[in-house]
Amino acid sequence: MASNPVRVGFIENRGPNTLLNLLNSELPRAIDVRIAVAFITFSGLEDLLPTLQGVASRGRVRILCGLYQGFTEPRALRTLLRLQQRSGGRFEVRLSKDVRFHQKIYIVGRKTTATIIVGSSNMTGEGLRSSGEFSIGGGAYIVLYVCARPPRPWTRGCKADCRGRRRKKQCRRHARTRPCCHL
């Protein structure tokens, strides 16, 4: 494996330097995408949906979402659940059991490299485009180790299918503001 330096850049969400533009340029080459965000709105999801579906057709997409402050929109979750049901296991959505889950991380994996973006941007229209958000991103060969193991919040997340009675009780325990079972 060649030794390449780690690339690091700032995403100011100003002009063409937006998280939305970066993700839309990185996702078409991705085979493994992992996203953990506190909020998802339909306007943010709509911007990324075509490219996320493209990744799921050739690889895997995992999204971990929070219900913090009740900001995540049910319409966005319903859209994600429909995609999950049609994907044959290539698209997976989970809801954080932590009622204060507030992470924002985007990991875009390719065959030999990955890009990791951490910052203040949720998967909302404003979060992906607004100048009030700021992120830092980087990529190199070495970060594949990070992608090899799911982050701990992912493994503790509630599956977002919520079909069984047991699952509904589990979800009500952790989602005080809006039960995820009634999407």
Image (tube, rainbow, N blue to C red):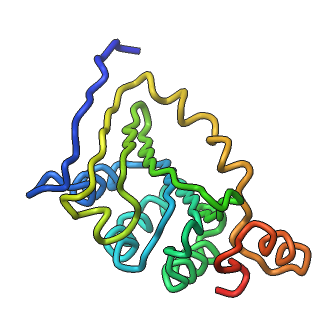
Vertical arrangement, residue 51 with respect to residue 143, above or below = below
Residue 136 image point, x, y percent:
30, 39
Which residue extends farthest right? 166
The structure residue drawn at horizontal position 81% and vertical position 69%, both measured from the top left corner, is: 173
Identify whether 5 is placed above or below 34.
Answer: above
> Dividing the picture into quarters, in which one does residue 167 lie?
bottom right
Foreground residue among 123 and 108:
123
Residue 77 as seen in the image, left or right of residue 142: right
Residue pictured at 37% horizontal, 43% vertical: 117
* Residue 141 x, y percent position in the rendering: 40, 24
Residue 147 location (% of width, % of height): 54, 36
Query: Where, quadrant-wise, is the C terminus in this rendering?
Result: bottom right
> Residue at position x 63%, y 42% from top?
150
Is residue 175 depicted above or below 59 in this figure? Answer: below
Which residue is nearer to you in this view: 57 or 48?
A: 48
Left or right: where 11 falls relative to 73: left
Q: Is 107 rendered above or below residue 61?
A: above
Residue with the most extreme left position: 15
Tell me where residue 14 appears, x and y as whole percent: 13, 56
Count of numbered badges drawn on the protein: 0
- Residue at 43% x, 76% y is 41
Q: Quadrant of the N terminus?
A: top left
